[in-house]
Amino acid sequence: FCTLLVMRLLFLSLCGIFGLVSPWDSDYDEVFLARARLRTAVDVSVIEDRVPGRSYTWFTAHVALGGDVRESFSVLAPHGGCGALSSPVVSAQMRGKTCSVVSNGGFFIPHPDANETHACLGNAVGFGEHLSSTESIVPSFAVTDTSFIVGYVNRTDLEQYDVDNAISGQGWIVRNGKSYVREALVREPMDLQQSGTASMFTWLVAPRTALGVDSAGRSIVAVVDGLEAAYKGVNLFELADIMISLGAVQAINLDGGGSSSMFANRTLVNVPSDICVGADLGQRCARAVSTAVCLMDHSEPRGSPTSTVSTPSTVSTSQSGSPARHSHSKTRSFSPQAASADLLTSPRAAVPVWSVGALLLTCVVVFGPLTETR
């Protein structure tokens, strides 16, 4: 028996050394960007189409494609920090940042008790300032000077890496170019959201905000509307398919619902679900949130101050209740550059995983006869 046990342990060790078997995914992927940083502008478009592979589901998404994620992506908090709330575009102005595109960010406490604040939930780092952190299993999107990290990053990891900007979400939806929603549903406690059980939150059709990166290391932000009768939003599986169709190789789901909003050049471009307080009937407003995702134009110096301007933060709807849009035709799809030597994956990145069943079958075939020896 002891000999059989030692041989099986040796077999598993050799499989692990040579990369044949890895029973569990790594907690996160770190990808080093070796190429020169491109100075490009943020590209914004509207896509109205069916979810790829799901002909019965229509969606409207406002998509922002930035440049090098190390230069274009940053996280902002209100002037009062994570305990305060403000519109994403107001946070950008008060922080003195020039954001070509700004959207809502991570989850927060929307209705705090008397002894609580609107605290950020999960990890949040803005321009090197640690705003919030956790030891829970939550998917995070972080950038350093040389790499980006996507996955289950906790407080210890943030302290270990020299992270410039980071934000947490609920649902690691795309990993290595494939949908990761089912795995995330099993691995994550889904305790940041307040929509019910993990399964309910995953399948809930609602406005969504996603943050990702393509194979060329460029940032992608997508905000899916959910106001119109024909466009009620998407679930996490559909959101993953949308991000993959946009070229994302890694993506996480950020706070959604009424928090989902996107501003381009300080103008609200999507149709939030919140009705403006004290405004005319049909006007929709961006919800005040705890953190915001900022995409910067590389033609501008990073973090350069911006002047205070009047900011349209409402969207009017037609008499039928549908938002007034410029076009209802599908816009172009992004064609990300193919991954090449520009991307160098660290040893922490995921390796091919064999199923547990295949592992057990291999052990039985190799060592099964030994168990029948009298």
Image (cartoon, helix red, strand yellow):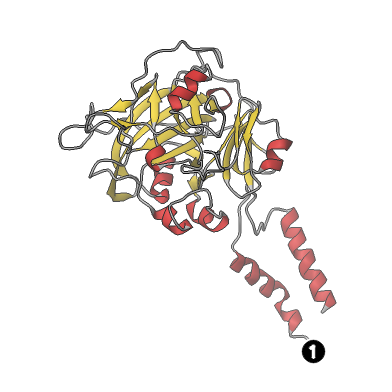
Q: Position of residue 43 (x, y in %)?
A: 41, 23
- Write down the residue under mark 1: 374
Q: Residue at x 54, y 39 (%)?
A: 117
Q: Position of residue 338 (x, y in %)?
A: 50, 33
For the residue marked with disc 1, what is the amino acid?
A: Arg
Above or below, 217 against 312 in this view is below
Foreground pick, 360 / 321:
321
Does residue 257 appear to the left or right of 66 in the view shown?
left
Residue 52 seen from this side: yes
Residue 219, compared with residue 179, is above or below; it is above
Q: Position of residue 60 (x, y in %)?
A: 30, 37
Q: Nearer the viewer, residue 22 or 255?
A: 255
Residue at the farthest front position: 114
Pick the front one: 341 or 355: 355
Image location (x, y in percent) of residue 70: 58, 26
Check the image and name the residue furthest to the left. 319
